[in-house]
């Protein structure tokens, strides 16, 4: 095989494997290390506790915190996802949300799918998570999740 054919074959492999490589960069278990609130208050475990596991197209997110009134609140989501070089797509399998208001938790089993664009800047991978959830910026073993006007969560990969 000539050198041009080898180069074309290598380029084709990169194009075909690029989406897989992008998703692999997110795979792992992440823990929340800090939450910053709009008023500048910072919360750290045990005031806010979160685990986010992403593995082979499945993810599970669980976050617990206290409201400003001191009431316990939590959010849990299980979903499938696909990520390409340009798009992030997620299908909800289950969401449970208790906002700490004393009202019953809300549940979502609808199986909705949404897709958002992915941006790459150097080693940063960023996208807005679907369903009105935070914007995420992943870089190596750290990522931030920002929900405008609500919080910025800082996460680290568990090694």
Image (tube, helix red, strand yellow):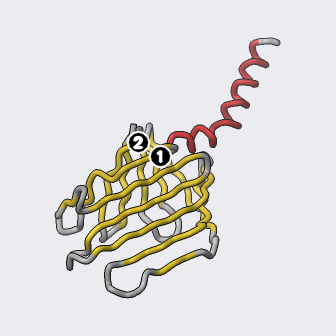
Q: Decide: is 33 above or below 6.
A: below
Question: Does 149 appear above or below 81?
Answer: below
Ranked by sequence position, the earlier of labels 2 and 1 is: 1
* The label number, if any, that marks residue 139 in the structure image: 2
Residue placed at 60% from the left, 56% from the top?
81
* Identity of the residue drawn at 63% across and 71% down: 112
**CB atoms at circles 2 and 1 under 8 Å apart?**
yes
Quadrant location of the N terminus?
Answer: top right
**Residue at label 1?**
125
- Which quadrant of the figure has residue 94? bottom right
Residue in the picture at 51% in, 71% down: 95
Task: Give the residue at the far right of this rendering.
Answer: 1
- Image vertical order of residue 17 relative to residue 5, above or below: below
Q: Residues within 10 Å of mark 1 (few under 14, many from 20)?
A: some
Tell me the CA gap for discs 2 and 1. Answer: 7 Å
Would residue 85 be found to the left or right of residue 97 on screen?
A: right
């Amino acid at each position: 095989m000539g050198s041009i054919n080898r180069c074309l074959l290598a380029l084709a492999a990169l194009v075909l494997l690029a989406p897989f490589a992008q998703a692999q960069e997110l795979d792992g278990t992440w823990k929340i290390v800090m939450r910053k609130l709009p008023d500048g208050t910072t919360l750290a475990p045990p005031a806010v506790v979160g685990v986010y596991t992403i593995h082979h197209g499945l993810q599970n997110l669980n976050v617990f915190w206290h409201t400003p009134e001191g009431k316990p609140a939590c959010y849990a989501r299980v979903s499938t996802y696909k990520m390409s070089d340009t798009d992030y797509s997620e299908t909800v399998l289950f969401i449970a949300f208790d906002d700490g208001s004393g009202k019953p938790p809300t549940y979502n089993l609808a199986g909705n799918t949404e897709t958002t664009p992915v941006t790459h800047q150097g080693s940063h991978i960023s996208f807005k998570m679907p369903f009105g959830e935070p914007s995420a910026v992943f870089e190596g073993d750290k990522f931030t999740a920002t929900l405008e006007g609500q919080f910025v969560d800082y996460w680290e990969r568990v090694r």
